[in-house]
Amino acid sequence: MTGKTNPPPKTIDEKIQNKQDSINYLKDENRRLGNEIGILFDEREALKVRRDTTKNLTEKPGLQTQIDAKLTEMNTKEKQQGENRSKITKLEGEISDLEAQKGGEPLDTEFDPQRLPQNGPFDHLKNSVARQMGDRDVNQYETRLKGLETASPERRLPLSEGVQNSVSLA
């Protein structure tokens, strides 16, 4: 045999890297397909306009055939995107299994808001808003809001006169 073949990966890390490379390739392929679908959509819309505005009645059936062909091609590419997404999901599962074999933390493929850091990237904005409202930080602000929600109607803060006037006018 003169043909070269790549030897199978020996370590779990190599297997993971190969699967990650496959995922990246499939994601690039889906982006390319998405661009092609967008172009086909634009071409199809242009053909529809041409079909609807042409005075030549013999040209209309040919335009409709072209429009239908564009739609078929778009559907084929969308189907391929779906198959690629399924492959990506499968590969991510295989990577998680390999990570578990390796003893590392499995690849996180699902969004879990409970796992977000408590000092997230937007806490400085939340704290800024809280300070503008007269509170020390976002925690004090949220606590005060919860207190207002649970307060009995007579203990709730009265509406300012400007708000009362706009409500009575409405």
Image (cartoon, rainbow, N blue to C red):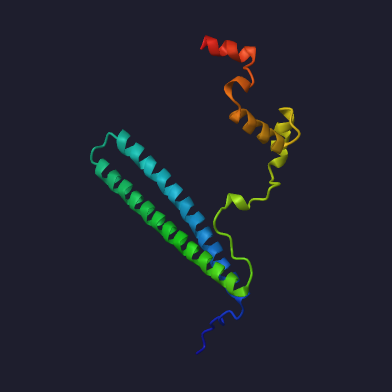
Camera sees residue 59:
no
Instruction: Please tell me in which quadrant of the rendered image residue 44 appears.
Output: top left
In the displayed orientation, state which residue is furthest to the bottom. Answer: 1
Residue 146 x, y percent position in the rendering: 62, 33
Q: Nearer the viewer, residue 20 or 90?
A: 90
Residue 137 x, y percent position in the rendering: 74, 36
At 71% across and 27% down in the image, what residue appears?
133
At 51% across and 66% down in the image, what residue appears?
93
**Residue 126 left/right relative to 32:** right
Camera sees residue 72:
yes
As drawn, 58 above or below 7: above
At 54% across and 83% down in the image, what residue appears?
4
In the displayed orientation, state which residue is furthest to the left. Answer: 58
The total of numbered circles placed on residues is 0
Q: Nearer the viewer, residue 93 or 69?
A: 93
As drawn, 67 above or below 137: below
Instruction: Please tell me in which quadrant of the rendered image residue 154 appears.
Output: top right
**Residue 149 left/right relative to 32:** right
Residue 48 x, y percent position in the rendering: 34, 40
At 41% across and 45% down in the image, what residue appears?
41
As drawn, 167 above or below 78: above
Q: Nearer the viewer, residue 79 or 2?
A: 79
Residue 89 x, y percent position in the rendering: 49, 62
